[in-house]
Amino acid sequence: MAGRKAVDMTGQKFGRLTVLAKALAGPRHAVWLCVCYCGEMREVERTALVRGRQVSCGCHSREQSAKRCAAGLRSH
C-alpha cells in the first residue's frame, strides 16, 4: 500500500523463526530474512509470519512426520 510505513520486525520471533532483516520486496507483501533455530535461513512473507502460517524452515514438519512414522512402526 502506497504511503504506508513498514513496521520493522527485526529481532521478533515467530515459532522457531527469528527475523534478521528485511529482504527484497515480494510480489505482493514484504519479505523478511529469517533464521530457524536449526540454523536454516529462509525468506518469508510478513503475512505468513504474523498469521502463523510459517513457524519454521520446514524442520518442524519433518520432525513431526518422522515421529508419526516411528510410532507407526512400533505399533506393528
Image (cartoon, grey):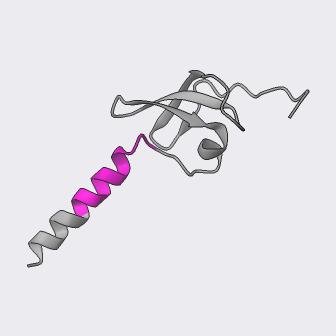
Q: Is residue 54 left or right of residue 23?
A: left
On screen, residue 23 above or below 70: above
Q: Quadrant of the N terminus?
A: top right
On screen, residue 1 above or below 25: below
Farthest residue, direction right: 3
**At 36% across and 49% down in the image, what residue appears?**
60
**At 50% across and 29% down in the image, what residue appears?**
34
Whether 69 is among the magenta residues is no
Predominant SS along the magenta part: helix
Whether 60 is among the magenta residues is yes
Q: Quadrant of residue 5?
A: top right
Q: Count the numbered circles shown.
A: 0
On screen, residue 42 above or below 59: above
List x then y, in percent, for residue 62. 30, 51
Q: Quadrant of the C terminus?
A: bottom left
**At 52% across and 47% down in the image, what residue appears?**
54
Q: Is residue 58 left or right of residue 74?
A: right
Q: Report the magenta residues as a range.
A: 56-67
**At 70% across and 25% down in the image, what residue appears?**
8
List x then y, in percent, for residue 48. 60, 45
